[in-house]
């Protein structure tokens, strides 16, 4: 049986993504790490199949994606995001997407939405 989560062949890529996160990703992660949100364990750059998601709470199958501007401008990126999200949701995950602007300007509101999905 092939592993679908945190595949070994993608370990280096996930490590690179963690080391090179944007300031917005750092802000969101600073609020989710160390079980700060309702005691739930989040993982960053978590591998699901061929994809790495920004943040994941595996125990409740919740994925958090931070979308930069390119996710809304480029049609090819939009298409790939839809395919990726469909794959992840077909495994039983809920995917929450937030824009950079939402995270920076309303981090408390973002955390409230995430909290509702944890309960």
Image (spheres, rainbow, N blue to C red):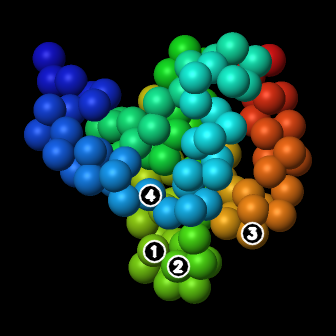
| Residue holding disc 2 | 70
Q: CA distance from mark 2 to mark 1?
A: 7 Å
- Label whose residue precedes the other's in the sequence (2 or 4): 4
Question: x and y percent of residue 42 in the render?
Answer: 54, 27
Which mark is on residue 101? 3
> Is residue 89 in view?
no
The secondary structure type at the circle numbered 2 is helix
Question: x and y percent of residue 36 in the render?
Answer: 69, 24
On screen, 76 above or below 39? below
Name the image quarter holding residue 47. top left
Which mark is on residue 21? 4
| Residue holding disc 1 | 77
Q: CA distance from mark 1 to mark 4?
A: 19 Å
Q: CA distance from mark 4 to mark 3?
A: 16 Å
- Label whose residue precedes the other's in the sequence (3 or 2): 2
Residue sitting nearer the eye, 23 or 117? 23
The secondary structure type at the circle numbered 1 is helix
Q: Residues within 10 Å of mark 3 (few under 14, many from 20)?
A: some
């Amino acid at each position: 049986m092939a592993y679908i989560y945190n595949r070994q062949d993608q370990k280096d890529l996930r490590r690179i993504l963690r080391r090179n996160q944007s300031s917005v990703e750092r802000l969101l992660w600073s609020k989710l790490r160390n079980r700060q949100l309702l005691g739930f364990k989040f993982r960053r750059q978590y591998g699901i199949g061929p994809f790495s998601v920004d943040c994941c709470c595996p125990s409740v199958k919740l994925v958090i994606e931070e979308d930069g501007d390119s996710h809304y401008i480029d049609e090819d990126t939009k298409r790939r995001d839809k395919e990726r999200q469909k794959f992840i949701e077909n495994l039983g995950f809920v995917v929450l997407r937030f824009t950079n602007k939402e995270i920076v300007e309303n981090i408390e509101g973002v955390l409230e939405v995430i909290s509702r999905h944890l309960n």
